[in-house]
Image: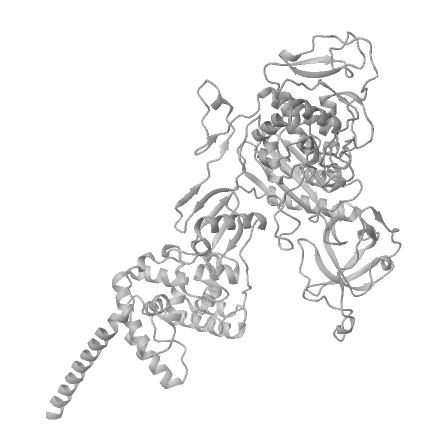
Amino acid sequence: MKWIIRLLKAGALLGVIGILAISAGYFYFAPQIPSIDGIREIRFQVPLRVYTRDGQLIQEFGEKRRVPVRYQELPERMIQAFLAAEDDRYFEHHGVDYQGLLAAVFEVVSTGERTRGGSTITMQVARNLFLSLEKTYERKLKEIILSFRIESELSKEEILELYLNKIFMGHRAYGVGAAAQVYYGKDLGELDLAQIAMIAGLPKAPSAFNPITNPERALQRRDYVLGRMNKLGFITPEEHQQAKERGVTAQLKHSRIEVKTPYVGEMVRNYMVERFGEEEAYTGGYSVITTIDPVLQPAADDAVRRALLEYDHRHGYRGPEGKADLTQAAEGDAGPRLPADYPPVADLLPAVVVKVDEKRFSARLGDGSDVVVEWEQMNWARPFINRNARGSAPKRAGDIVAVGDIVRLREILIEGPEGDDADTTATAWELSQVPEAEGAMVALDPQNGGIRALVGGYDYYNSKFNRAIQAKRQPGSGFKAIVYSAALARGYHPASLINDAPVVFDDVSLEDEWRPENYSGKFFGPTRLRVALVKSRNLVSIRLLRSLGVDNVLAHAARFGFDPEELPHNLSLALGSAVVSPLEMSRAYAVLANGGYRVEPYFIETIKDSQGELVYQARPLQVCPSCMAEIPPEPLPPLSRAAPRVIDAHNHYLMNSMLRDVVRAGTATRARSLGRDDLAGKTGTTNDQRDAWFNGFHPSLVANVWVGLDSNDQLGRGEVGGRAALPAWIYFMETALADVPEAPLRMPEGILQVRIDPHSGKRAYPGQPDATFEVFPADQVPSEQSGVRTPLSSEPLEATPEVPSAAESRPRDAPDSMEIF
């Protein structure tokens, strides 16, 4: 009996000693333990995400991929899987599971293996948030103390939510939401039981049990989790067996980009870094809704690429990008393999030629698959000599390629075989090459300036220079619209006559006199403004600018958003010698499209933080005609501001009337292929065809296209705006206007239509056979009737090739800047 009493005393003493030891340890370590006061304010490092106007993902920026989820959004099976794998008594203990610790020790002693640890989920949260990863008893004690504190501060649900959002899951994925997307490309609710168990097995060792890098061990860990779920009654034996029979279905998934527009993504990234700083921008979980349209953006990309490839094919094949090492072919291979340092460029895939026949060749793509290129998809490839000359047409495939050539191919649609049961289209592989020329497009809503599509080049990853906003190029004849609008504002009308005749200007800065010419080298005498704009007559534009005064035109250009200080202060302004970006041209032409109001381009609608709180809302200038009138205004869209009117309704109507004739009968007649009568615009071509433009619009959409070489070299003979740039605009508008009804040009009050003599601009005499209709402000209708016809400028408005502006209109020794007056 005495030994029992002694044993109890000894036990009590040991208990007291243990309590004292624990207390001493607590008081010793407590001052060293981090405070958890801010645990409720802990912010997850969530990447910056950029979306289209309707919420489709454009791009994601940030090292850590995380998709935060609330506890209520977690599938029950996901919670059960993690409890089974990590802490099945989680909802029963208070941060430290003594039973679990003893069970883990017993498991190690009895089996020599450690399949589950003694750390609870709360202890893992303490370690991941506040402690280092060193494995020491001191850190373990701190972990235990922190766990008690966390349990006293947060509910079990809050702790579990924190854990499942914070835990590292491998491959830059943090939290279960990101893991579901990274490994399966799914949301949590779309995962099956086997996939849930696979994810639940990751936290123990994200690399060792990773289904991508170590699928065998990952499968073992998954089956362990499934077994635990079965043992704990979370799943039935049938479910357990069915899930175990599933193989590894994980595949590494990148962010689910739905609309690819990296040029816009980079614009947003730059803005966010400027506003919030780099660290906050990349980790603050901001969601940016842009103005980009998910249908128009890919249409713009495709249109620019198609036009650039057409340009490139017109100038011949420059040969292979390189040669593969024919001695390195593996034994049994049909030919050489593609080296690894040839990345795709947009839709142009690298390939190595492995076999050449008479009228076809076979090539091997980067994934090891072989494709065949038929004669019809390569016979364009006449040898490139220079941008104005090509070699002879090839007669066989061997004239174009040889085994070992590294070439570019793209998959295209062609007409399929005929027959009732056959598809109307088929795919084929076409020989191509990365275009020498680059291009840009900006499409915006003229009612508020929202950018609906933006293309900065053929491929962002091949060249990150954003030509839509960064390139400064001469607009050529595209600037004439501004000059002619200024003329209308100062009393001219479409029938005003300007003499198209030789003119000479002296300038002390030049060795020679400046003798500008028309592209044709001809002179047409007195010419109506409408004809001069439609035909893009340079001499008329120069004389018109001289008559108006450069300062007056500069002031008018400011109404369209141009900075007069950045424009030439001389007569070269009439020929588009300024340097501007495609975005600036879009802003200017929006005035002509929307009724005469200046709007400011913008690309960000809203910015929200990680909690969904609004931190930025755009306040665009909105066209609101009644807001300028002395009547109760129409309600503006929320947070919008009324755009200022910068040209009156008469000016707008007359400019639209003339610019629609550019499409009907001028330098942009190719756009008639769209089958619409509500399109307007102006081509532009600069010195020696260095820049090609088309600035066009429909009342609902403005789109400006530029094509040129980054080196500012010549594009080649005949590569004017109507040939190099206009096709991209047409391809884009085919999609953009597919479901848009015709928009007739409505004549405002105070405009009259009168029959005139096309040669003199005066009223036509009764019965005049060649009379034409013209529109005038009521106070400018010609009062004088034409008399006997004179043979001056008697050409009708009919389709003509484009006339470059600056190329033929400066002395040979003039500098490219054209500042020669």
Quadrant of the image containing the N terminus: bottom left
Q: Which one is nearer the viewer's eye here, 161 or 449? A: 449
Rendered image quadrant of residue 657: top right
Relative vertical location of residue 709 with respect to residue 768 in this rendering, above or below: below
**In the image, is 328 to the left or to the right of 116?**
right
| Residue closer to the observer: 790 or 131 | 790
List x then y, in percent, for residue 704: 64, 37
Q: Is residue 628 left or right of residue 352?
A: left
Query: Going by the image, does 747 lie left or right of 276?
Result: right
Is residue 233 among what the camera can see? no
Quarter holding the C terminus is: top right
Name the residue at the front extreme: 508
Confirm whether residue 122 shows in the render: yes
Relative to 230, say whether 362 is above or below: above
Image coordinates of residue 746 in percent, x first then y, are 61, 21
In the image: residue 39, left or right of residue 556: left
Residue 424 in the image: x percent, y percent? 74, 45
Quadrant hosting residue 549: top right
- Does residue 106 sit above or below 443 in this rendering? below
Between residue 720 and residue 633, name the one nearer to us. Answer: 720
In the image, residue 514 above or below residue 58: above
Q: Residue at x 41, y 49 (%)?
A: 609
Where residue 196 sits: x, y (%)? 46, 64
